[in-house]
Every structure is written in C-alpha cells, then in structure tokens.
Amino acid sequence: MRCPFCAHEESQVKDSRPSEDNTSIRRRRQCEGCGARFTTFERVQLREVMVVKSGAGGSDPRREPFDRAKIEQSVALACRKRPVSPERIERLVSGIQRQLETLGDAEVESRQIGEMVMEGLRQLDSVAYIRFASVYRDFTEARDFEEFASTVREVGGQ
C-alpha cells in the first residue's frame, strides 16, 4: 500500500479489525519509509458495476466504473451539519453498493443510483433528502423547494 504522505511503496499493517457495520476491514498501517501511520479500508466487491451516464443532446451515453466515493461525498454533503452519524452514512452507502452489486446487471444507469440515494436519504433525514434532491433534480426557483418540501411533509405524515 502506497503511503499517502511520502508515496513509499511499502507499509506494515499494525492493526486490523472489522468496521462497525461488518462490511469492511479497517487496517492501521505504518509506512516503512517515513514512519507515518494511516488507515485503510478493505471491502468485498462482488462484481464490477459500470455506471451509464445519460448523454447530452442525444449523444452516446458515457460509461464509467462505479465509484463508491462519489456517493459517500454526495451523502456526506447532504448530511452536513445534520444529526446524522458517520456510521449511518456508511451503512446507507454500503447498502446502496450491495444493492447495485446484487442486481445482476453489469451496467446500471446513474439515474437509478440517484433514486436509491434519494430513497435512503428520505428515510435517514428529511433536510438531507431535500438538499440532495435540490441538486439532483436541479431546482432553479424557490417554488421548486416549496413544492418538493410539501411532498416530504406528506411522506413523513403517513
């Protein structure tokens, strides 16, 4: 494992333990070059999933490998300054990744992933849900927020 501080190629594992949700292994490592310590996570990947991005203007759609970090970043941003623990965010992202890997499809549309994230956030935190939706659904006016927020209240009231 390459050191993130000095880029030395060798590191030594000092400690390994399962993550809180038991979906990954957390490893504490020490660089053999500079002596710095850092943490890595090892996860099982059931299959390689390609994300199909919709093409603009009718062009051919782009395909790229699924990147868990993109979902983690989006969900963390939506949950910023909200009472949502990092562990709950990790469980949400791991659940979405597991769903994608067990679908049986080698390709999944980015729209489908966005809907999975929306559904997960809806159950996690209503403010984070609205934040994510405002970007994902490209709200352009205050009216867009008002209309969407009214549907959130209806979902929460059921």
Image (cartoon, rainbow, N blue to C red):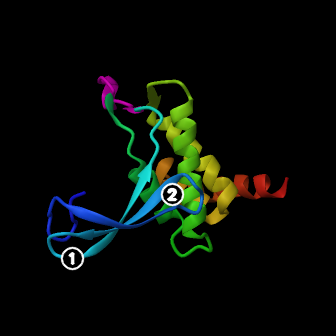
Q: Residue at x 45, y 51 (%)?
A: 71
The quarter of the rendered structure image containing the N terminus is bottom left
Left or right of 42? Residue 120 is right
Task: Please check the rendered image and state whether residue 50 is part of the magenta-colored stretch, yes or no.
Answer: yes
Residue type for callout 1: Gly
| Depth order, front residue of 13/78 | 13
Q: Describe the element under mark 1 as helix, strand or loop.
A: loop
Q: Are the residues flagged by discs 2 and 1 in contact, CB closer than 8 Å?
A: no
Q: Which residues are magenta?
A: 49-61
| Depth order, front residue of 78/9 | 9
**Total numbered badges shown on the rendered structure:** 2
Q: Residue at x 54, y 50 (%)?
A: 94
Label 2 crowd bin: few (<14), some (14–19), many (20+), radius 10 Å:
few
The residue indicated by pointer 1 is 35
Left or right of 123? Residue 139 is left
Above or below 86: residue 157:
above
- Mark 2 and mark 1: span between their CA atoms? 52 Å
Percent position of residue 6, x then y: 14, 69
Residue 140 seen anywhere in this rendered image of the structure: no
Percent position of residue 143, x then y: 59, 57
The residue indicated by pointer 2 is 141
